[in-house]
Amino acid sequence: MPVTETATAAPGDPAAAWLGALEARHLADLRPAEVGRALRALSSAYVERRERLARGAALDGAGKRAAFALFYGPLHFLIVRAIVRAVDAAAPPLDLIADLGCGTGVAGAAWALECAPHPRVFGIERHPWAADEARWTCRTLGLDAEVRCGDLSRVRVPARASAVVAAYTANELPDNARAALLREIVGAHTRGARALIVEPIARSAVPWWPGWVEAFRAAGGREDEWRFPVGLPGITGRLGRAAGLDHRELTARSLYLSNR
C-alpha cells in the first residue's frame, strides 16, 4: 500500500482558486453549519445506507448538494490527482479523457490538469445537477469540456477517447450496469485508451472488486491501494472537522491500464 506525497492544494496550485470559487458558489445561500449537518447525513448514507445512493439520495437537497460539492468533490479531486501522479498516467499527452459517472467533474479535471497540454474532458453523468456542476468545475479550472446526462448502463466510450476514468462510480451501479461498464472500459483500452478506476478502500463497498482486478490484470493492468497524507484545504477541512470526519489521510483503491 504505497504512501506518497501529501495530497493538498497549496497557494499557486490551480486547484486552490477553484476551491475558493467553490466555497463562494455553495455558501452564497447556505450557512456552514447547515452544510455541516448535511455532510453528517451524507456521510451516514455512504456508510450505512448505500442502497439509497442508486436512487440519488446523495443529492436530494440543497444542503447535501453543497456538502457533496464542498467536501467529497475536493477529496476525490486530490485522491485522483495523487494517483495519476503516482502511476505516471499523464504522459505521453492525451487528447480526450472520458469521465464516466463524472459527478461534479473532479476526476476527469484532476487528470486533465496533470497533462500538458490539457486534454478535453468528456463527461457522462445521470444527475442533472451534478452534470451542471461538472460543467462549472471544468470551466472554472480552464478546461475544455463537454458533459452530457446519460445512463451508464448504455454508455459508449467515444472512439476518440485516449483515456477513461471512472472514480467512485461502479460501486453505485447495479450488477448488470457494472458488468457492462467493465466491458466498455476494457474495450476502450483494447482500442488504445488508458483506463483508471478509483473506488473506496473499504471492501464492504466493493464486493465485486476481485472480478475487476482479474479483468484488469488479464489486460496487463495493475491494482493498488493508497494512503495519502492529507492537508485538507479551506472549507473542505473545516466542514470535515465540524462533521467529525477524520481525514488525516486519504485512502483509495485503484486499477490502472496503461497504453504504453
Image (cartoon, rainbow, N blue to C red):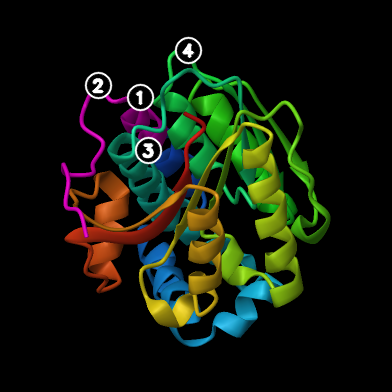
Question: Label 4 amino acid?
Answer: Pro
Near mark 1 (Cα within 10 A), the count class, few <14, some 14-19 or many ≥20, is some
**Residue 106's spot in the image, x, y percent?**
49, 42
Separation of residues labelled 1 and 2 (CA atoms) = 6 Å
Describe the element under mark 4 as helix, strand or loop. Answer: loop
Mark 2 is surrounded, within 10 Å at the Cα level, by few (under 14), some (14 to 19) or many (20 or more) other residues, namely: few
Magenta stretch: helix, strand or loop mostly? loop
Q: Nearer the viewer, residue 77 or 169?
A: 169
Lower sequence index among marks 3 and 4:
3
**Residue 96 drawn above or below residue 253:** above
Report the mark closest to the observer, 3 or 1. 3
Graded by Cα atoms within 10 Å as few (under 14), some (14 to 19) or many (20 or more), the crowding at tag 3 reads many
Left or right side of 34 for 108: right
Q: Inspect the image, locate mark 2, and give the three-letter code of the amino acid beneath it.
A: Gly
Q: Describe the element under mark 3 as helix, strand or loop.
A: helix
- Check the image and report above or below for 38 versus 141: below
Left or right: residue 159 versus residue 250 is right
- Horizontally, residue 94 falls left or right of residue 252, namely right
For disc 1, the marked residue is: 14
> Badges 1 and 4: C-beta atoms under 8 Å apart?
no
Instruction: Name the image quarter holding residue 201.
Output: bottom left
Q: Point out the frontmost of discs 3 and 2.
A: 3
Label number found at residue 84: 3
Q: Position of residue 91 (x, y in %)?
A: 41, 22
Residue sitting at x 34%, y 44%? 83
User: Residue 117, which numbered label?
Assistant: 4
